[in-house]
Image (tube, rainbow, N blue to C red):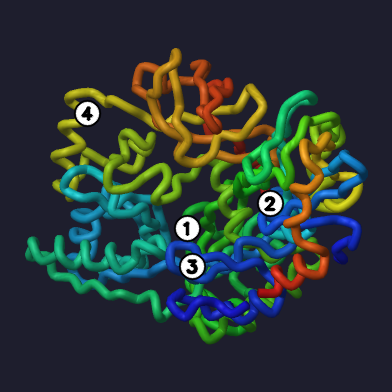
Amino acid sequence: MAASPDLQKTPLNDVHRACGAKMVDFGGWDMPVQYSGILDEHHAVRTAVGLFDVSHMGEIEVRGPQATELVDYVTTNHAAKLKPGQAHYSGLLYETGGFVDDILVHKIDDTHFFLCVNASNQEKDYRHIVARHGETAFEAEVEFASPRYAQLAIQGPLANETLQKLTGTDLSAIRYYWFTDGEVAGTPARIAHTGYTGEDGFEIYIAPEEAPRLWQEILNAGREAGIRPCGLGARNTLRLEAKMALYGHEIDASINPLEADLAWIVKFDKGDFVGRAALEKTRAEGLKRKLAGFEMKGRGIGRDGYEVALNGSVAGWVTSGGPAPTLGKNIGLCYLPISSARPGQAISIMIRDAAVEAVTVETPFYKRPKSAGKSA
Amino acid sequence: MSYPENLKYTKEHEWLLVEGDMGTIGITDHAQEELGDIVFVDLPKVGGKTSKGLSFGSVESVKAVSDLYAPVSGEVLEVNGLLATSPEQLNTDPHGAAWLIKVRMDSPAEASDLLSAADYQKYLGE
């Protein structure tokens, strides 16, 4: 079945369809949800290596003598602290403190930043940054750069050895959340030691026309390692185990970073930034609700949007929930009143009119084992 | 995967095997294929009732939960215990070992409007 003509497609759309991937509408994008199966792909990433097409993600570039000032004004983390070749996770906020998006900020040099943003938010993010820029006199230019990039994620304990076969860049020299511009299989690539799986791995940014060839080259390079092409289904179970936020679930315009347990990406010790006043007010008044992790105790799976009850009354909602294939448990994230949002709190998830027992737990649910030195 | 001729099918992707006034209910291969990896099956207890066209339980895959709709009304006589411990069997043998429940049908005539294997496959192709 062909994709609806209204859906956007990545440069790998034909490749996914030819491989028999199951395709879904993901925020207006025709994307693979699975190839061999979500569980198989999930385990491949935890134990070997998986390859994801994440070309739907957007890219925005900020250039100019005051690029740093502009990025620091529109984001919550402290961009001026980044060194060239370093990246960090950050928030793009409204004046209200709610999220426009969560993003990765890469500093290329003092006058050039590269932002990776969510697929369905990219036009909104660009318009937001341009509008906020207009209120300032910062000497910088903002470019909507998505059409110039495809993005592939190579994730798993064997990601390094797989990708290393295709590049002269010494990957083990790229520290976590750093990146470098090099070549992969003979084509220029921005190689970032980042990911959205809780596992070791890389995300590479390449020219869209090179994506189908690189997809195949990486699959070939990972054959002995047991590489699997992976879809958005496994991406979701992997990021949930690692407690990484998904826009539209844990965060949106009505949620601020302090509530989302993302205070670490908000740097109050820098200058003014969009949303700062609202966050300071929240901090002064005290948080009312906060994100918490839970494990199901009773039979059932707490799914996105289900209500959470405390002592028989509805007190919150599940933002993401499902099976955790690595842990063999059913887990989820939910918003709870601040007084109850700590580990060990008994809660009930309302599953189809029945209250099913669950308990809040420490997060992340899964943390990858620290490798002792260089991986084998 | 072929669709056995001796089963009857619903547009909600359940199947029914009629033996006298006994009905065995399962989900189709198409259903398991669409759901993906199945991790949990919620079924009624023995002695419970099913009502034709209404939900009698749910099946959960890694990514979603789906209702199970009863092809006929009846009383639940048996529940497949295999699925409590091995729900993934629904992905491998949906028309056989991974049947869901057996019911004593209130009225076997209720099965008359279900689809034949040929009509169900035609329906899937549309």
Reading the chain from its start, which is encountered first: label 1 or label 4?
A: 1
The residue closer to the viewer here, A347 or B94, is B94
Where residue B42 appears, as percent x and y from the top left, is 70, 34
Amino acid type at image mark 1: Trp
Instruction: List the residue tagged with mark 2.
Output: A42
Amino acid type at image mark 3: Thr
Where residue B81 appears, as percent x and y from the top left, is 85, 31
Front label number (1 vs 4): 4
Where residue A345 appears, as percent x and y from the top left, is 49, 16
Instruction: List the residue tagged with mark 1.
Output: A178
* Discs 3 and 1 share one subunit: yes
| Helix, strand or loop for disc 4 | helix
Reading the chain from its start, which is encountered first: label 3 or label 4?
A: 3
Pointers 3 and 2 in contact (C-beta within 8 Å): no
* Discs 3 and 2 share one subunit: yes
Instruction: List the residue tagged with mark 3.
Output: A180
Q: Is residue B101 above or below residue A342?
A: below
Marks 2 and 4, how far apart at CA: 38 Å
